[in-house]
Image (cartoon, grey):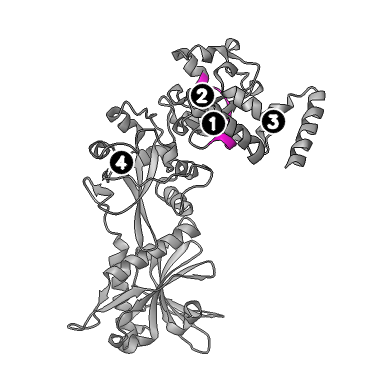
């Protein structure tokens, strides 16, 4: 590490000799100064943070910067001195007026990752802020401690400002208020050490936000961390928490648990809780288990996925057809013929889950077993992660709801879900039978809901075809 920074300062010195302002530019590209940030409001600046006021805390941070993060002593001193009131421009020391708030909002800052835990610490360099009026320009770098909620990437700044038009995608999400929810208890995610690592399931949420709202949500997912919420939210009492406006966006499942993805709109809540300091258009998001201890549906609940009922009906018809004839002959679409290729052949059916254009196919494989199977498309997903999640959630709900009687008066056939298995380019979920004795001629076939790349399928297949995945 020492060698690394020796090289850095040799390079910086050489650049300085060439008349280039090297220090700020080189610090900017180190791992400690990542990306360009803006401050949304001066109400987020914390002038009395412990790292500024408390000598012992300052000493501890100085040691951390040098010994833990490899900062040279001069750089650590510069950062910590920049946090002091005396290290800041005079116009900030004298108190920030309404006009000066606009200047603060236009400053370009870089995150000092080594100090960014409870608060965000931004460092401002003269060379990066020459666009501000001359009377506000400064000659030395300085730092500000800011609550995380009030710090955003430059790319998001204009979208969040109250006077700015948000994107069509964001507007589409903001008008999606069909399913208001009441939060009974917060179970928040916090991570004091890093804001570049998001919650588990980020790929699922990113895919769902893109599918439903056409939003690139990685930046939104950052605001799931309670550390970047307005201070006061996590300490609301039970009665005030019930007043907090919140809306359901979508659901997903992990390890048999259903989770809801919730949007908490800043603009609506600013009117209810003026003391908290919401910034209009700077919403935050929340993942919560679908559990009455945590959440109550205020009005409408989202409807059950229409595909569940359709899948169960397709399963019933497939089992009846196979019991009659192992080539599913009764399901063939009238007037259709087999499409033959080198690996086998297929023929369309009238069975579908989505719409008639996405009807299932009977497939006859050219192998030593010569088996027949039914494949029905269930979804063309956004990407592989979305497809894997859809396959899982459909399989979970189908085994919960399905009880199929092949003949009037028969004991219904019920299912349970096997552990998911990785297959080439996807995942496979087998719907196992609870009572094998009820199957009759169907004992050799099994249902699977599977994802292959970005497509989800229902498959009624000869058991031995998938034994390799299950055992």
Q: Which residue was labeled with disc 2? A: 53
Q: Which residue was labeled with disc 3? A: 73
Residue farthest to the front, as pictured: 56
Q: CA distance from mark 3 to mark 2?
A: 20 Å
Mark 3 or 2 closer to N-term? 2
**Residues at discs 1 and 4 in contact (Cβ within 8 Å):** no
Determine which quarter of the picture holds residue 387: bottom left
Q: Secondary structure at mark 4?
A: loop
**Residues at discs 4 and 2 in contact (Cβ within 8 Å):** no
Q: Is residue 334 visible?
A: no
Image vertical order of residue 69 relative to residue 442, above or below: above
Q: Residues within 10 Å of mark 1 (few under 14, many from 20)?
A: some
Q: Position of residue 234 (x, y in %)?
A: 35, 38
Q: Which residue was labeled with disc 1? A: 57
Q: CA distance from mark 1 to mark 3?
A: 17 Å
Q: Residues within 10 Å of mark 3 (few under 14, many from 20)?
A: few
Q: Position of residue 210 (x, y in %)?
A: 45, 48
Q: CA distance from mark 4 to mark 2?
A: 37 Å
């Amino acid at each position: 590490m020492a060698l690394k920074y020796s090289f850095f300062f040799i390079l910086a010195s050489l650049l300085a000799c060439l008349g280039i302002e090297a220090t700020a530019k080189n610090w900017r590209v180190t791992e400690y100064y990542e990306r360009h940030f803006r401050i949304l409001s001066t109400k987020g600046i914390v002038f009395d943070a412990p790292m500024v006021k408390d000598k012992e805390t300052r000493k501890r941070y100085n040691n951390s910067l040098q010994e833990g993060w490899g900062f040279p002593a001069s750089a650590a001193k510069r950062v910590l001195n920049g946090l002091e009131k005396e290290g800041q421009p005079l116009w900030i020391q004298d108190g920030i007026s309404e006009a000066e708030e606009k200047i603060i909002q236009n400053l370009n800052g870089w995150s000092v990752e080594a100090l960014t835990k409870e608060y965000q610490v931004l460092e401002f360099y003269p060379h990066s802020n020459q666009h501000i009026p001359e009377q506000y320009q400064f000659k030395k770098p300085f730092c500000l401690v800011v609550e995380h909620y009030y710090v955003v990437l430059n790319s998001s700044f204009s979208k969040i400002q109250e006077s700015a038009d948000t994107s069509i995608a964001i507007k589409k999400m903001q008008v999606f208020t069909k399913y208001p929810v009441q939060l009974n208890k917060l179970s928040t995610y916090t991570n004091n050490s890093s804001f570049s690592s998001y919650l588990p399931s980020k790929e699922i949420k990113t895919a769902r936000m893109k599918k439903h709202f056409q939003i690139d949500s990685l930046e939104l997912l950052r605001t799931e961390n309670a550390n970047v919420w307005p201070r006061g939210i996590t300490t609301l009492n039970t009665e005030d928490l019930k007043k907090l406006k919140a809306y359901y966006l979508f659901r997903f499942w992990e390890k048999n648990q259903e989770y809801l993805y919730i949007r908490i709109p800043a603009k609506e809540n600013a009117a209810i809780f003026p003391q908290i300091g919401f910034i209009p258009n700077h919403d935050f998001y929340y993942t919560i288990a679908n559990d009455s201890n945590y959440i109550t549906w205020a009005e409408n609940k989202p409807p059950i996925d229409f595909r569940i009922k359709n899948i169960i009906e397709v399963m019933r018809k497939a089992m009846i057809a196979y019991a009659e004839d192992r080539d599913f002959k009764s399901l063939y679409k009238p007037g259709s013929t087999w499409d033959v290729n080198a690996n086998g052949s297929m023929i369309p059916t009238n069975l579908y889950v989505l719409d008639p254009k996405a009807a299932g196919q009977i497939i006859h494989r050219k192998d030593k077993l010569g088996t027949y199977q039914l494949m029905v498309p269930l979804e063309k997903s956004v990407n592989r992660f979305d497809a894997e999640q859809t396959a899982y959630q459909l399989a979970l709900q189908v085994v919960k709801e399905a009880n199929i009687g092949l003949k009037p008066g028969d004991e219904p056939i019920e299912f349970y879900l096997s552990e998911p298995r990785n297959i080439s380019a996807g995942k496979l979920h087998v719907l196992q039978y609870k009572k094998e004795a009820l199957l009759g001629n169907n004992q050799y076939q099994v249902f699977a809901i599977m994802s292959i790349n970005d497509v989800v399928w229902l498959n009624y297949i000869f058991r031995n075809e998938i034994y390799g995945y299950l055992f």
